[in-house]
Image (cartoon, grey):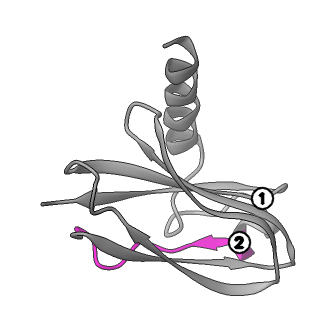
Amino acid sequence: MRRTLGVAVVLLLAILLFPSDGEAQQSRERAQSRLGQNYPNPFNPSTTIRFALPISGDVRLEVYTMLGQRMAVLVQGHQPAGWHTVTLNANTWASGTYIYVLRTPEVMITQKLLLIK
């Protein structure tokens, strides 16, 4: 329970401290790293997420519940620079709002997605 609460607090702080893709950027790397809004949104049962990297490197793209429970790791490992597309299939998940997080050594970007069944 304590770990889940800690993850939820980190995600909440990330949402508050790091603006989403469409808002003001805080650094040169942040301006070049992008996490697009999933499409379609709301979705049922699958959606597409796009992200861009200015340079190749280690990347992690994860999906969390609003309580901080990790639901999926969509990308983990070294990725080349450029645009990438990932499909999320949430056919066994409950309806609700989820957070997806793109992490690189330089940046962490979050977005929300909405699953409606």
The residue at the far front in this view is: 92
The picture places residue 115, in percent across and down from the top left corner, at: 24, 59
At 53% from the left and 67% from the top, the residue drawn is 21
The picture places residue 90, in percent across and down from the top left corner, at: 33, 62
Q: Which residue is mark 1?
A: 104
- From which residue to which does the magenta span run? 31-42
Along the viewing direction, whichever of 26 and 48 lies nearer the viewer: 48
Question: CB atoms at circles 2 and 1 under 8 Å apart?
Answer: yes
At 86% from the left and 78% from the top, the residue drawn is 55
**Which quarter of the figure has residue 34?**
bottom right
Q: Is residue 116 left or right of residue 57?
A: left
Q: Nearer the viewer, mark 2 or mark 1?
A: 1
Is residue 96 magenta-colored? no
Q: Which residue is mark 2?
A: 33
Sequence-wise, the earlier of marks 2 and 1 is 2
Q: Is residue 47 left or right of residue 95?
A: right
The picture places residue 7, in percent across and down from the top left corner, at: 56, 29
Q: The residue under label 1 is which amino acid type? A: Thr
At 16% from the left and 60% from the top, the residue drawn is 116
**Residue 79 bears which disc, if any?**
none
Q: Count the numbered circles shown.
A: 2
Q: Crowding near pointer 2: few (<14 within 10 Å), some, many (20+)?
A: many
Most common secondary structure along the magenta stretch: loop
Query: In the picture, which quadrant includes the C terminus?
Result: bottom left
Assign a secondary structure to mark 1.
Answer: loop
Q: The residue under label 2 is which amino acid type? A: Ser
